[in-house]
Image (tube, rainbow, N blue to C red):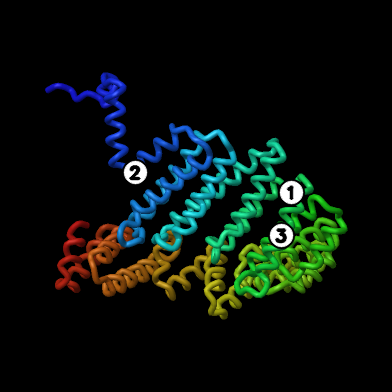
């Protein structure tokens, strides 16, 4: 049988006219292919190239949305991948301004796609993030560009940040304005950027749910003031915005670096509720620096009981009495609490201390934990471990109602057999077999052991 020839070999034998005819025929049947060819190999001015690029975007959207006007979950990944591939095609373009426009077109379509695509897996969000990363890289590459080009980039990005497509997606315009800071080394451009941020903050006045956006915008303002203005101006701006947690954290950091621990404590105590743990930790470090042992103890215990395990070691080191007594006291407090964090701390602590008696007590009260601790406990408490394990298997088998759960029961039996021995495993298998004789799927899984 003759070997099939490669397509490249066949095409090499064709005349130019024949190749043109083939390509024209395919292009006539595939709009994406046609516009990709025109974009990649066609010559023309910027408006024409951008028009071709826009057609490509719309063709891809139409291809995936179809008559329903919506992209279902199973097709969203391919849609996002096609737009990213289209974005990559701009690498063949030499004009950076043109590259920027192409990226902004894909960005706009990507954000619009949140309305007409099922983004359960975050593919559209990933697409938008990728475009923003590319825009960021493109802006960074303009460091040595002419002033007119840098001004164009800044102006265009500011204008894009004001696009109505971002309504409800405040993170994205903030990101665009943050990208603009690469041009802030020039005073005129910096003033233009600060004016744009100020205008956005004014536009947000009275709106709901813009606190995060406003704080991010004010953060950019501060970065620019801190970098390009006097230390006095930067400090004044920071002090005026201490009601925002990000600025309070910054003030705490600066006070800590300056060794002004009393100021750290004051700032932390006045901090908002949103970052309460962070402020407590800052206050603890200030207490530590000032050697305020009693205050340290009280706050370390508070942080520990709030769920931060690292403060157990701090609190233990500060304890002057018997360490075992201290340990038992903390255990008692954790047992009395009915919070999830207290339970997690309790299991972490008894595990780290390898407190086998306490672990066994915990396992007896929580049979589901037996598989995690069986190997550790079996040497000292073999009989008790096997009893708990057996009860757990019985309970799990009783609650099982489908083949997947029956399979899980059998896997449990395997692990039990490794611990208790083959004869014990077989005895349990026989017992389960007799008790649930009317569950054929379970019996089938048991027969595979």
- Label 3 sits on a secondary structure element that is helix
Quote the CA–CA distance across marks 1 and 2. Answer: 41 Å
In the figure, is residue 231 to the left or right of 272? Answer: right
To which residue does mark 3 refer?
219
**Residue 389 drawn above or below residue 99:** below
In the figure, is residue 84 to the left or right of 10? Answer: right
Between discs 2 and 3, the one toward the N terminus: 2
To which residue does mark 1 refer?
189
For mark 1, does the 10 Å Cα neighbourhood hold few (<14), some (14 to 19), or many (20 or more) residues? many
- Label 1 sits on a secondary structure element that is helix
Percent across and percent down for residue 216 are 67, 61
To which residue does mark 2 refer?
31
Q: Nearer the viewer, residue 25 or 210?
A: 25
Q: Which of the 4 image quarters holds residue 406?
A: bottom left
Between discs 3 and 1, the one toward the N terminus: 1
Where does the N terminus fall, quadrant-wise?
A: top left
Quote the CA–CA distance across marks 3 and 1. Answer: 18 Å
Quote the CA–CA distance across marks 2 and 3. Answer: 45 Å
User: Contact, CB < 8 Å: mark 3 with mark 1?
Assistant: no
- Label 2 sits on a secondary structure element that is helix
């Amino acid at each position: 049988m003759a070997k099939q020839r490669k397509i490249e070999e066949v095409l090499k034998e064709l005349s130019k006219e024949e190749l043109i005819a083939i390509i024209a025929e395919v292009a006539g049947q595939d709009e994406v292919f046609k516009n990709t060819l025109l974009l990649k190999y066609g010559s023309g001015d910027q408006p024409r190239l951008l028009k071709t690029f826009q057609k490509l975007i719309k063709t891809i959207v139409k291809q995936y949305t179809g008559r329903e006007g919506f992209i279902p979950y199973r097709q969203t990944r391919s849609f996002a991948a096609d737009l990213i591939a289209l974005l990559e095609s701009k690498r063949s373009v030499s004009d950076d301004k043109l590259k920027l426009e192409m990226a902004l077109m894909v960005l706009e379509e990507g954000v619009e796609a949140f309305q007409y695509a099922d983004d359960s897996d975050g593919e559209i969000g990933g697409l938008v993030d990728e475009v923003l990363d590319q825009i960021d890289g493109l802006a960074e590459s303009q460091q040595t560009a002419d002033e007119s080009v840098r001004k164009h980039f800044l102006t265009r990005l500011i204008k894009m940040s004001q696009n109505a497509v971002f309504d409800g997606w405040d993170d994205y315009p903030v990101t665009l304005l943050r990208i603009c800071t690469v041009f802030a080394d020039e005073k005129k451009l910096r003033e233009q950027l600060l004016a744009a941020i100020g205008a956005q903050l004014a536009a947000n006045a009275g709106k709901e749910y813009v606190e995060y956006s406003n704080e991010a915008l004010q953060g950019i303002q501060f970065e620019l003031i801190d970098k390009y203005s006097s230390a006095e101006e930067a400090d004044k701006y920071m002090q005026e915005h201490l009601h925002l947690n990000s600025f309070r954290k910054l003030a705490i950091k600066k006070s800590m670096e300056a060794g002004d621990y009393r100021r750290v404590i004051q700032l932390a105590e006045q901090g908002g509720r949103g970052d309460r743990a962070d402020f407590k930790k800052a206050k603890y470090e200030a207490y530590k620096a000032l050697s305020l042992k009693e205050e340290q103890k009280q706050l370390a215990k508070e942080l520990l009981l709030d769920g931060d395990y690292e403060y157990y070691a701090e609190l233990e080191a500060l304890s002057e009495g018997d360490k075992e007594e201290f340990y038992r006291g903390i255990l008692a407090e954790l047992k009395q609490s009915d919070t999830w964090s207290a339970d997690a701390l309790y299991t972490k602590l008894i595990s780290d201390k390898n407190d086998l008696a306490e672990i066994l007590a915990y396992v007896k009260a929580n049979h589901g934990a037996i598989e995690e601790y069986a190997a550790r406990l079996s040497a000292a408490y073999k009989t008790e471990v096997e009893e708990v394990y057996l009860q757990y298997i019985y309970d799990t088998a009783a609650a099982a109602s489908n083949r997947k759960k029956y399979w899980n029961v059998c896997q449990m039996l395997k692990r039990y057999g490794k611990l208790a021995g083959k004869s014990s495993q077989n005895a349990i298998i026989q017992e389960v077999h007799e008790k649930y004789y009317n569950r054929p799927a379970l019996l089938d899984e048991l027969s595979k052991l």
